[in-house]
Amino acid sequence: MQPPAQVTPLSETLDNRQKWLLLGSLMLALFVGALDQTVVSTATPKILADLGGFTLLSWLFTSYMLSSTVIIPLIGKLGDIYGRKLFTIGGVALFMVSSAACGAATSMPMLIWVRAIQGIGGGAIFASVFATMGDLFAPAERGKYIGLFTGMFSLASIAGPTVGGWLTDHLSWRWVFYINVPISLVAMPAIWFNMPSRPHNLKPKLDFLGAALLSGASVAALLALVWAGDKYAWTSTEIVGLLGGAVLMTAAFILQEKRHPEPLLPLHLFKNRVFLISNLIVFTFGMGVFGAFQFLGIYVQTALNASATASGVITTPQSLGVLFTSVMGGRLITRTGRYKWLTVVGAFLILIALGALTQLGLETKLWWISAWMVVLGLGFGLVLPTMSLIVQNAVHYQYIGVATSSSQFFRQIGSVLGIAIFGSILANTYHDEFAQRFGAEDCAAVGSTICEQLNDPTVKLNAGEYALIKQHVLALPDGEAILARAEYAQGESVVIGVRHIYWGAVAAAVLCAAFALMMKELPLRKTVAGGPATAGSSDAGAGGPVPETAPGGFSH
């Protein structure tokens, strides 16, 4: 191992004006990544209607989230060693180019592959931005700045669904990707001029094998979850082999981290109970909230027959709830130094909102969904923004990038698993329920080709294709009754699938609340540098245990 080196925090090299300019640049970079996450879910039904591939639905999200998940720990480690400037700018540049390619996609497989590249850029942005927050402000004062970042995220969340819906309805779903290009062109020079570079003269041994093993384990587990019960049986050789491979690669990753002098994810951090519990909270949070949220647009546009714009508008109140509680929660944390019970309250608000959404039906009113989106947002704003503060406060400053990226990694992997599982649940449930409601007799009457087309709930969002289907069905004897049964079967099958999804989300939320109750509260450190304070200490200062080694042995 390389010996520890003295680290000069970024906060000590900048004056107040430079800090605020850098803060504004980071917020703009965050807006770039956050906007994409909110606009795509609104446009998804139209994307499926245009490109087809309802069975590939979950991959539209998981390809992005998987690639961003596996890159985050590596970017966090590299940022600790080399500084975060080039990784932030590079992430925005890659995100911009891949966004343009997403907009030009001509097939669902092409879009999925380009979304995976886009995820690498998005992962680099988020890993760099939130770790830089830890470089700039001490945990004890960081609470009041959380609101600014959450405000920017909320602005993207507020504007994203509405703008995405409007673009989809009036221009094309392709513009929900093209819109990232001009924003990125503004963000890159802002970061270049305002974020300082970090000089370095060491050549640390990077853990590329660990990164490969972690990526392989994640991909294998995801493929198993997406394909199980659909493409292959759960007990098939393919699924068992993928799950076994994931377990073996995870074991190899752990061994690699133990022996490598510069581990991608230092395992000794998991001996820290606050670090461990915080990651379990964000994992279950990601699975329950992000995993389930992605499918709400499918329900609104196919079961309730609402427009993409309306689908975006009803989710906007969630962002208002996030903005309110993140700002107020940040102020309370700064004033009191306490954070545990805010997290607990937020987790239970999430649990209540997800429980209410298990009652969605064909007659549900849009305002009712929006009301529960507010409650979900209030809980969201108390839990997620606080987690990065908690995990950064729990480790020595020299591990702040690794700790931040680990929190994002576990949230992302939870979201990826949630989307994969819930996407499989929706697809399998829909096909089974549709077959029961639109029986063999009706299917024979319309013909196998039309029956297969109707077995996709997004087909009616493609006006031209659905007009031909209706024309064919209505020309049949008793055609109106057959068409009515088909549309009812589509709507009711989507409803049942979405209800199953939200029951799964409730289970994840129960675990999230339980972990929040188990979390130990540490005093907030009053300086940027230093290590974690112990519970009951009077000053969370620059002291604390020195880590086994400083990542890369670098200095500013």
Image (spheres, grey):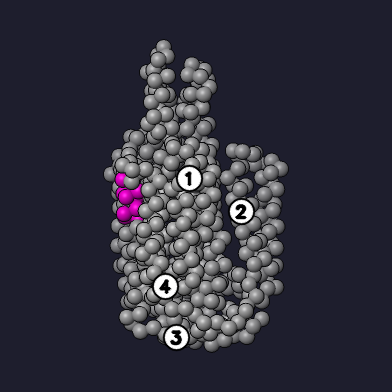
Q: Which amino acid, mark 3?
A: Gly
Q: Which amino acid, mark 2?
A: Val
Which numbered disc, 4 or 3, marks the residue closer to the eye? 4
Vertical side of 480 occupied by 556: above or below: below
Farthest residue, direction top: 477
Which numbered disc, 1 or 2, marks the residue closer to the eye? 1
Considering the whole magenta stretch, tell me its main secondary structure. Answer: helix
- Taking the spot 50% from the left edge, 41% from the top edge, the residue there is 107
Dots 3, 1 in contact, CB < 8 A: no
Left or right position of 68 against 21: right
Q: Which amino acid, mark 1?
A: Ala
> Which segment is the magenta one?
157-166
Circle number at residue 219: 2
Labels 3 and 1: the sequence-earlier one: 1
Q: Secondary structure at mark 3?
A: loop
Residue for badge 1: 105
Instruction: Find the distance from the CA under tag 2 to the CA under tag 4.
Output: 34 Å
Which numbered disc, 2 or 3, marks the residue closer to the eye? 2
Q: Nearer the viewer, residue 382 or 2?
A: 2
Vertical side of 548 occupied by 294: above or below: above
Reply yes or no: does residue 244 show up in magenta.
Answer: no
Labels 2 and 3: the sequence-earlier one: 2
Vertical side of 40 occupied by 430: above or below: above
Residue for badge 3: 541
Circle number at residue 260: none
Circle number at residue 192: 4
Q: Nearer the viewer, residue 442 or 107?
A: 107
Residue 187, position as x, y percentages in the image: 38, 65
Determine crowd level at label 2: few under 14, some 14-19, many 20+ residues with C-alpha closer than 10 A: some
- Taking the spot 64% from the left edge, 67% from the top edge, the residue there is 208
Labels 1 and 2: the sequence-earlier one: 1
Instruction: Find the distance from the CA under tag 4 to the CA under tag 3.
Output: 32 Å
